[in-house]
Image (cartoon, rainbow, N blue to C red):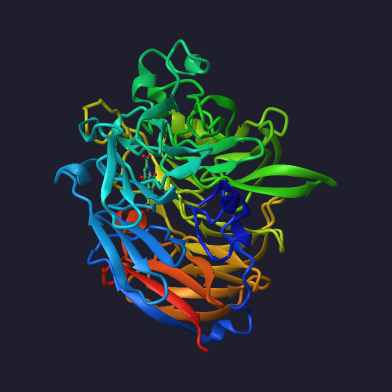
């Protein structure tokens, strides 16, 4: 496929070529065969089993009638029309790998380029497969699991370079982003998310703290080909106990604007300096062209885990708007001049070791599950979290390959009485919702929006759901048999609009919430494809 197709994103309706449905990660499609009127007639066309019982977060890719989808232990190619398996290529990793994975045995998807399928493995390898038959063409070890590194991220191919991130900030690692040659796997560059003392930003770490400073890069970046810039989010600093690491801790909880050919940092913006609350800033950096104060502006949008919705000028990193989209009590706002949060006593007390109740919780106002931006309504549709967390530091010592947190995990949640999550239609410039569809159990699935005026997402209890983009009214649902943490996509083939999503329960909420309402959700990974009944 070509860069041009990827740039077109929403308008190349016959393929789904990358994570995010276009380099801008808008997850928006101009297709409208499935619309507010017809969505009630949406029926499953086929279902394909992964023979797996883990959380299935993979975003399917579609190219010339073939779906490429991943699980933690396999890469699969399936005929998009019939659901017939074309090939399945198994992934092996050492049995001890799950021990250094913080939040679920998962993989978020592949990248396609030049006849190859690229993906990462849980034991921190990057591999290339032949798209025709699934044969492994090259494999590169990015990092060592013994040091606490793992990989769940879908690669990005930008300017002819395969770009990957890393997981492991909860295990005393030092994050990075890598560039690889798609043809040979040759390692082209590595940009650390934590600078060493002699690099710019190195002075934001004291002593040796930078060596264990975290800053994972576990969600795929966006790319602006015109500016030839990749935008990649950086995770939380390690350990959570911020008393151990005084300073701003660059580039944790930041976005980096980078040159894809060299990995060179063009600018950065830090959302949460010296963050105690695990507010990874990895979530999708969505690109759009918007009118800001009457001027057409190239923006980057981020529904940050810290509870603020940010709009930046992506040409230079200048802050244009930052407003809460969920309840926030660790800061009263963001200083528009300095770009820094105006922190409350909750942040101060947390740093001083006092027990606090913080909103949002350590899972954030929104976790990893990607939102959709619909340029026709101008709204971002996001699954948000409505609960707080209890936070208390404890002393911590580093042991290689073990959790490195410095936080008491025994009494984590402040659930409150209301719904624990919402699907919200958010105005990017104000953070305010046009509508909110509540959910007693929070949603951890990606969101898709379309020109048909429909928004798709899934529930942890298994329902795949469609909502009216203008009102939030639920229009349709279908029970997929296991919980949905997948990322819906759509494309058109031979005049039919298809919608696909993976089903398969697991992930961070199931691991840490203790939510008994989910105790009996059946496991079982599979791919569902839907179309309107003809
Ligand atoms: O810091 C990290 O390296 C890291 C990695 C991951 C991951 O790779 O899945 C998650 C998180 N952190 C995390 O904080 C988190 O809440 C989370 C949720 C999930 C998930 O897949 O449901 N992964 C991760």
| Spot occupied by residue 398 in the image (x, y as percentages of width and height) | 25, 26
Q: Residue furthest left?
A: 95
In this view of the protein, which residue sits in the foreground, 439 or 258? 258
| Spot occupied by residue 142 in the image (x, y as percentages of width and height) | 31, 33
In this view of the protein, which residue sits in the foreground, 413 or 251? 251
Does residue 205 sit above or below 337 in this rendering?
Answer: above
Quadrant housing residue 123: top left
Q: Residue at x 42, y 61 (%)?
A: 60
| Left or right side of 100 for 367 | right
Does residue 261 sit above or below 45 in this rendering?
Answer: above
Q: Residue furthest top?
A: 198
| Spot occupied by residue 101 in the image (x, y as percentages of width and height) | 27, 44
In this view of the protein, which residue sits in the foreground, 388 or 169? 169
Q: Residue furthest right?
A: 294
| Spot occupied by residue 353 in the image (x, y as percentages of width and height) | 40, 31
Q: Is residue 344 visible?
A: yes
Q: Residue at x 43, y 35 (%)?
A: 236
Quadrant housing residue 314: top right
């Amino acid at each position: 496929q070509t860069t041009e197709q990827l740039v077109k994103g929403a308008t190349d309706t016959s393929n789904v070529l990358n994570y995010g449905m276009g380099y801008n990660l808008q997850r928006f499609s101009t297709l409208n065969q499935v619309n507010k009127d017809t969505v009630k007639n949406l029926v499953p066309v086929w279902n394909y089993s992964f023979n797996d019982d883990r959380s299935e977060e993979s975003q399917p890719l579609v190219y010339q009638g073939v779906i490429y989808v991943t699980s933690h232990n396999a890469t699969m190619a399936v005929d998009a029309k019939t659901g017939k398996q074309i090939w399945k290529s198994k992934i092996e990793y050492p049995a001890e790998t799950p021990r250094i994975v913080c939040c679920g045995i998962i993989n978020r998807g592949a990248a396609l380029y030049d006849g190859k399928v690229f993906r990462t493995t849980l034991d921190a390898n990057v591999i290339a497969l032949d798209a025709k038959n699934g044969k492994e063409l090259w494999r590169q070890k990015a990092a060592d699991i013994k040091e606490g590194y793992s990989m769940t991220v879908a690669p990005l191919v930008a300017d002819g370079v395969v770009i990957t991130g890393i997981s492991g900030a909860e295990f005393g690692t030092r994050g990075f982003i890598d560039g690889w040659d798609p043809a040979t796997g040759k390692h082209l560059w590595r940009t650390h998310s934590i600078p060493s003392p002699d690099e710019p930003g190195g002075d934001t770490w004291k002593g040796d703290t930078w060596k264990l400073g975290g800053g994972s890069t576990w969600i795929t970046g966006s790319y602006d080909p015109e500016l030839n810039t990749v935008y990649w989010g950086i995770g939380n600093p390690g350990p959570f106990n911020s008393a151990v690491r005084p300073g701003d801790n660059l580039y944790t909880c930041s976005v980096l604007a980078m040159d894809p050919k060299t990995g060179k940092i063009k600018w950065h913006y830090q959302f949460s300096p010296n963050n105690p609350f695990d507010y990874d800033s990895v979530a999708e950096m969505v690109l759009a062209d918007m009118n800001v104060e009457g001027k057409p502006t190239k923006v980057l949008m981020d529904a940050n885990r810290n509870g603020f919705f940010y709009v930046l000028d992506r040409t230079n990193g200048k802050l244009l708007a930052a407003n809460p989209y969920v309840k926030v009590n660790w800061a009263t706002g963001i200083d528009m001049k300095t770009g820094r949060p105006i922190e409350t006593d909750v942040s101060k007390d947390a740093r001083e070791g006092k027990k606090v109740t913080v909103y949002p919780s350590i899972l954030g106002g929104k976790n990893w599950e990607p939102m959709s931006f619909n340029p026709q309504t101008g709204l971002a549709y996001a699954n948000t979290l409505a609960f707080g967390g209890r936070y208390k530091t404890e002393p911590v010592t580093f042991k290689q390959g073990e959790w490195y947190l410095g936080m008491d995990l025994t009494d984590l949640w402040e659930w409150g009485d209301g719904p624990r999550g919402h699907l919200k239609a958010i105005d990017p410039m104000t953070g305010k919702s046009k509508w909110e569809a509540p959910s007693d159990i929070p949603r951890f699935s990606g969101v898709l929006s379309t020109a048909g005026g429909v928004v798709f997402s899934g529930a942890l209890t298994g329902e795949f759901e469609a909502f009216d983009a203008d009102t939030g009214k639920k229009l349709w649902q279908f029970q997929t048999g296991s919980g949905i943490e997948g990322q819906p996509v759509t494309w058109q083939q031979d005049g039919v609009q298809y919608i696909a999503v993976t089903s398969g329960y697991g992930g961070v909420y199931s691991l840490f919430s203790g939510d008994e309402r989910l105790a009996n959700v059946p496991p079982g990974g599979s791919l569902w494809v839907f179309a309107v009944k003809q």
